[in-house]
Image (cartoon, rainbow, N blue to C red):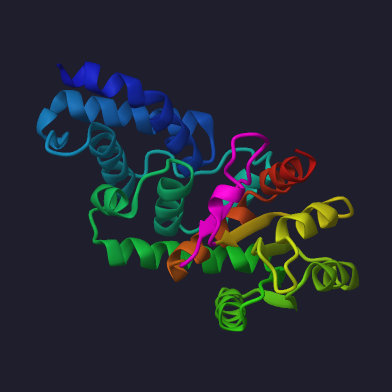
Amino acid sequence: MSIAMTIAPHLPYLRRFARSLTGSQPGGDAYVAACLEAIIADQSIFDTSLNPRVALYRVLVGIWDTIELNNQSGTLESPFERNLDALTPRPRQAFLLTTVEDFSIPQTAQILDTDEAGVKALIDEAGQEIASQVSTNVLIIEDEAMIAMDLEALVTGLGHEVSGLARTHREAIAAARERRPGLVLADIQLADGSSGLEAVNEMLGEIDVPVIFITAYPERLLTGERPEPAFLITKPFQTDTVKAVISQALFFDTRAGNQAKAVANG
């Protein structure tokens, strides 16, 4: 198969990525055009030993890093674009590749010509920058004390504030009413045998807030019978995973709130 045929299915996604990087459609399209012209001029820069999509994004990022073709943001119309514009270039690349483009950490390391530790450091930096934009208060609904403490340390380490720790349905609702959270981290099996999902459903009837479920029982949420949560982490969790998902939920704040509400109404 020719390189042209190999690349073609991935071009719409490459355009999306390039537009996000530059903040404008003309700027993004200019980078994609430069990427394709570079490959035509020297096909060796397209590494055929890599996954084709990884190889294509690697070429574009290499051009971005070396040529100031169009690094000016356009008109920022959405919360996504405004939040993105505030991220510095390298963390922005890592954040977009892992969240929007859905590349794995190893694939992102190949694209950015670094190692996995470097990618994780960039994602962590993006999380800190996002927190500086949208620092919020977080309600943690978790009945296991050690896990609740770990989550509290993680949240505050990102620059957010913990507004409450709840172990039961009743405590969760009371905490949400006492101080409206900007983000909820929720288990679904609580100390009194009640359901964290039911607590979240009741909460979302009163407020619109992004929710991240952290649970040892993901199958209870991933049933396919109703809208499923946008953000779901399985226990035991990795700290880096939770950090990345918190940043993602707050970054895409409108989308997160709407999707969480859909789960509540499903």
> From where the camera sits, is residue 85 visible?
no
Q: Provide the major secondary structure of the magenta segment.
A: loop
Percent of width and height locating residue 244: 50, 60
In the image, 260 versus 53, the foreground residue is 260
Q: Is residue 199 magenta?
A: no
Percent of width and height locating residue 23: 54, 41
Left or right of 105 on screen, residue 204: right
> From where the camera sits, is residue 113 visible?
yes
In the image, 242 versus 50, the foreground residue is 242
Specify the farthest residue to the front: 193
In the picture, which quadrant includes the N terminus? top left
Left or right of 86 on screen, residue 9: left
Percent of width and height locating residue 75: 64, 38
Which residues make up the magenta segment? 216-236
Query: Which residue: 12% across, 28% down?
Result: 43
In the image, 263 versus 211, the foreground residue is 263
Left or right of 43 on screen, residue 245: right
Rendered position, 124 above or below 82? below
Left or right of 185 on screen, residue 14: left
Residue 130 sits in which quadrant?
Answer: bottom right
Percent of width and height locating residue 250: 64, 57
In the picture, which quadrant includes the C terminus? top right
Query: Which residue: 85% across, 66% down?
Result: 173
Numbered disc total: 0
Residue 119 sits in which quadrant?
Answer: bottom left
Residue 10 sits in which quadrant?
Answer: top left
